[in-house]
């Protein structure tokens, strides 16, 4: 008997070239290492990105994601290993000879030039004819909805408008790949959320490959087809947003992507795709693909929205039921987040959707509550 297959989130679009052996990658990092003196920024890293993919490099500051992007752009050379584009090595190819463009976090707009001249700059450098430049600039400004701002200077624009100018300039040369280094970092939260969907729509419309560097997990989850979570110059896991969230491959990924509670336990029984363990004074039963045996140490990870919270004891308190005291409450508008302290001292998080204006069951600080969940709600982590 095998464990039932879990649904890993909604499928945004039917696009999975990485699962097709016949598909060749557009970009390939082959055992790439980059050292700066004694410091190793990228460590023996291999990675593949496919045509028309929106790919994100996600990780904390100093994990090597921007260095990886700069090597792809040609601003840095690998210490060892190779980077290939459409099967051709990029060794020794200068940035301006690579069929890709990079949009920087600072936007790097020329303050003395108008919007249209900023967009036209790269085209003029390439020696394109005047009429063709004018047509291309008009096309790009229409694409980013800035036609009526063509004569303005960058300082006369909002942060979101400057971001669009930088995007138009990056797209004007029609690169095979657009590289984006923290492209939305300078925008406020609401504008950043709006721009994420605009970038997704634009990428689909143009049929380009986007590679974005970000430390914002929500940004990566929203926009990307796949995400590479990076740690200390290496890739911790590459997967779709849904798989990273619902089936993280390690404790690091589970903790970095989204909010999670992790309970440490000891396996008491295992078989037929299920595992039972004792953790923090409770018996937990969950599905697991790991080969585990009684006595093994394992961690149980569960997202707060998978946990049910109530003052009333459940019908069955023997399995997947923990009792604790409300330690912190955060009202977030659409949901309320509860941090519940178990008798062991561990914290288990639960969210309650605020579907009604007035909560049916008022739960306050220091209340004794029960936390319950189904066997398929969490995951076992070995690493």
Image (cartoon, grey):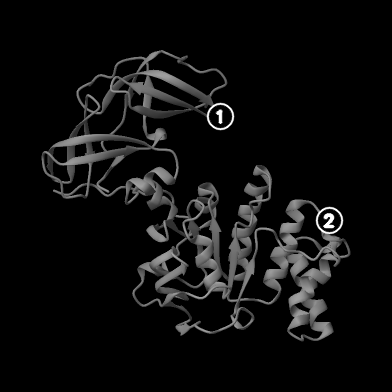
Q: How much space separates mark 2 and mark 1, taking CA atoms?
A: 35 Å
Q: Residue under circle 2?
A: 155
x 75%, y 63%: residue = 165
The vertical placement of 89 against 249, above or below, is below
Residue 377 seen in render: no
**Residue 15: x and y, percent?**
45, 65
Looking at the image, which is closer to me, 143 or 55? 55
Question: Horizontally, is 319 left or right of 355 in the view?
Answer: left
Looking at the image, which is closer to me, 71 or 149? 71
Q: Residue under circle 1?
A: 332
SS at circle 1:
loop
Q: Quadrant of residue 162?
A: bottom right
x 86%, y 55%: residue = 156
Mark sitting earlier along the chain (2/1): 2
The vertical placement of 205 against 249, above or below, is below
SS at circle 2:
helix
**Residue 40: x and y, percent?**
43, 64
x 31%, y 30%: residue = 373
Q: Label 1: few (<14), some or many (≥20) within 10 Å?
A: few
The vertical placement of 58 against 302, above or below, is below
**Residue 150: x and y, percent?**
85, 65
Q: Label 2: few (<14), some or many (≥20) within 10 Å?
A: few
The vertical placement of 43 against 244, above or below, is below
**Residue 350: x and y, percent?**
41, 28
Which residue is most to the right?
151
Residue 308 seen in render: yes
């Amino acid at each position: 008997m095998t464990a039932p297959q879990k649904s890993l989130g909604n499928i945004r679009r039917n696009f999975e070239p990485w699962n097709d052996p016949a598909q060749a990658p557009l970009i390939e990092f082959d055992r790439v290492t980059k050292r700066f003196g004694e410091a190793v920024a990228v460590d023996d890293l291999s990675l593949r990105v496919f045509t028309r993919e929106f790919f994100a490099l996600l990780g904390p500051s100093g994990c090597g994601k921007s260095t990886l992007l700069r090597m792809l752009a040609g601003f840095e050379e690998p210490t060892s290993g190779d980077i290939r584009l459409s099967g051709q090595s990029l060794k020794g190819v200068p940035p301006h000879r690579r069929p890709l463009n990079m949009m920087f976090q600072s936007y790097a707009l020329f303050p003395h030039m108008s919007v249209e001249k900023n967009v036209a700059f790269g085209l003029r450098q390439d020696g394109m004819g005047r009429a063709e430049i004018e047509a291309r600039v008009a096309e790009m400004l229409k694409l980013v909805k800035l036609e009526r701002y063509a004569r303005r200077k960058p300082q006369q624009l909002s942060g979101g408008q400057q971001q669009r100018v930088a995007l138009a300039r990056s797209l004007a040369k029609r690169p095979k790949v657009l590289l984006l280094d923290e492209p939305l970092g300078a925008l406020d939260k609401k504008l950043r959320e709006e721009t994420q969907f605009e970038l997704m729509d634009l990428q689909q419309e143009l049929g380009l490959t986007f590679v974005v560097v970000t430390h914002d997990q929500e940004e990566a989850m929203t926009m990307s087809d796949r995400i590479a979570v990076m740690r200390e110059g290496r890739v911790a896991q590459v997967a779709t947003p849904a798989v990273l969230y619902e089936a993280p491959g390690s404790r690091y990924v589970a903790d970095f992507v989204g909010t999670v509670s992790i309970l440490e336990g000891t396996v008491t029984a295992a078989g037929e795709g299920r595992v039972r363990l004792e953790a923090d004074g409770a018996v937990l039963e969950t599905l697991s693909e790991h080969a585990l045996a009684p006595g093994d140490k394992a961690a149980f990870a569960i997202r707060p929205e998978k946990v049910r919270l109530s003052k009333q004891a459940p019908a069955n308190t023997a399995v997947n039921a923990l009792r604790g005291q409300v330690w912190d409450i955060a009202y977030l508008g659409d949901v309320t987040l509860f941090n519940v302290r178990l008798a062991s001292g561990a914290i288990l998080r639960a969210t309650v959707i605020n579907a009604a204006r007035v909560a049916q069951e008022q739960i306050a600080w220091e209340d004794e509550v029960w936390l319950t969940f189904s066997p398929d709600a969490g995951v076992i982590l070995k690493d």
